[in-house]
Amino acid sequence: MPKQTKPPVEKVVLAYSGGLDTSVIVPWLRHNYGCEVVCFTANLGQGDELVGLEQKAIASGASKIYIEDLREEFITNYLYPMMQAGAVYERKYLLGTSIARPLIAKRMVEIAELEGADAVAHGCTGKGNDQVRFELTVMALNPRLRVIAPWREWTIRSRQDALDYAAEHNIPVTATIKSIYSRDRNLWHLSHEGGLLEDPWNEPEEAMYQWTTSPMAAPDEPEEVTIDFQGGIPKRINGVAKGPISLVETLNALGAKHGIGRVDLVENRLVGMKSHGVYETPGGTILYTAHQALEELCLDKLTLHYKQEVALRYAELVYNGQWFTPLRRALDAFVQATQQNVTGSVRLKLYKGNVILVGRRSPYSLYREDYATFGEEDVYDQKDAEGFIKIFGLPMKVEAMLDIAGLGASKYRTPDYSQFKRD
């Protein structure tokens, strides 16, 4: 075993992607901590990225690797609750990377306990959000585990440094200097950072996108899709029942085909700096639109409006890595209570980057045409409106009366031109 230069660690479980950083971390941990390294990879829908991971991990010096299919748990216990909450970070981001981290870290902790490891490690940089998400999860689930974050310790500072280290230790890596974008992919989204995006004035190049068709190159005819929900959970597409994985994959294919779900965002990171990222979330964008449309029918005004406030807080919790908190559980309890009657069908048209709502219906719809009809007096008497308006506008009326008594006119009626200066 190589000479140990760090405080003693017997065994560490590494969240392993097989990319450049985590490939280099395996020998670095062995060299600097003198410990056994067990790798863990969560299959969240990365596709081809999982090919050859076992051989690569062992060749890098790991004693073993766990590769586990967590896609259904990801959708059922993380994505669907987040969608039901309506969580969107800074008006655009559907939280594809953020929501995956607590699940990965949770399973990493469980494997560490299974293996009798005394530490866990991750490949997150010291500038990003993911380090917080991983480590808060570890703190919430097993604070006795030591967390090792090589990016906060080692002297590697660039992609070239990492490539040089890999070459020195004969570590197989696929990354090259030409790979200018940093990406994260799962069943829900694909993110892009770095490269040309470092200048937010630059238009993202079409070659950067790896999932969605350009809206300009998308089919010239719209495609209609109907999604059936039961208790806020999508169950069928175009009348065909589908399990969670099949449903999300089907919507991803439809959305990608029509250029749905591209987002360009300069966001505020948790650690205090801004970053520029581009996200592709085709199926998620369709689901959010459909679910929101059904809630418009099924939720009363007070609940719907308060739920919009909850959505903002929920999104912050997900983004900040605070999934395993009492507040998130409490918000989930509220959200689940609101979803009991969110059952019905939503009809959409997909066309050149747009999700166009064309119809929705529900047996629990609170919209009743017969109640809204002008001639229906037994439900809504138009004469009642006069008293309602007088009471509703009473504060405005009192303010105007005071203005007239003191100033001779309402302050809103006579503009104060003295505040405007001539050039």
Image (cartoon, rainbow, N blue to C red):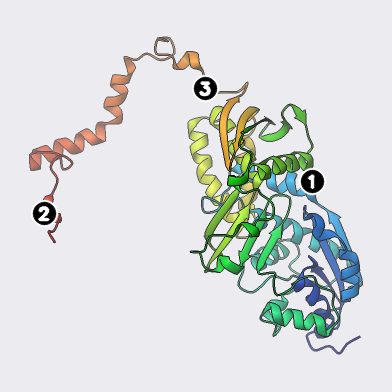
Q: Quadrant of the N terminus?
A: bottom right
Please tell me the numbered disc located at residue 39. Answer: none
Query: Which residue is nearer to you in this view: 155 or 171?
Result: 171
Q: CA distance from mark 1 to mark 3?
A: 34 Å
Q: Is residue 306 placed above or below 207 in the rendered structure? A: above
Q: Secondary structure at mark 1?
A: helix
Badge 3 is on which residue? 367
Q: Is residue 146 visible?
A: no
Q: Which residue is mark 2?
A: 418
Which residue type does callout 3 highlight? Tyr
Q: Is residue 208 above or below residue 239?
A: below
Closer to us: 298 or 166: 166
Which residue bears the numbered disc 1? 72
Nearer the camera: disc 3 or disc 2: 2
**What residue type is disc 2 on?**
Ser
Which one is nearer the viewer's eye here, 360 or 309? 360
Q: Earlier in the sequence, mark 1 or mark 3?
A: 1
Q: Secondary structure at mark 3?
A: loop
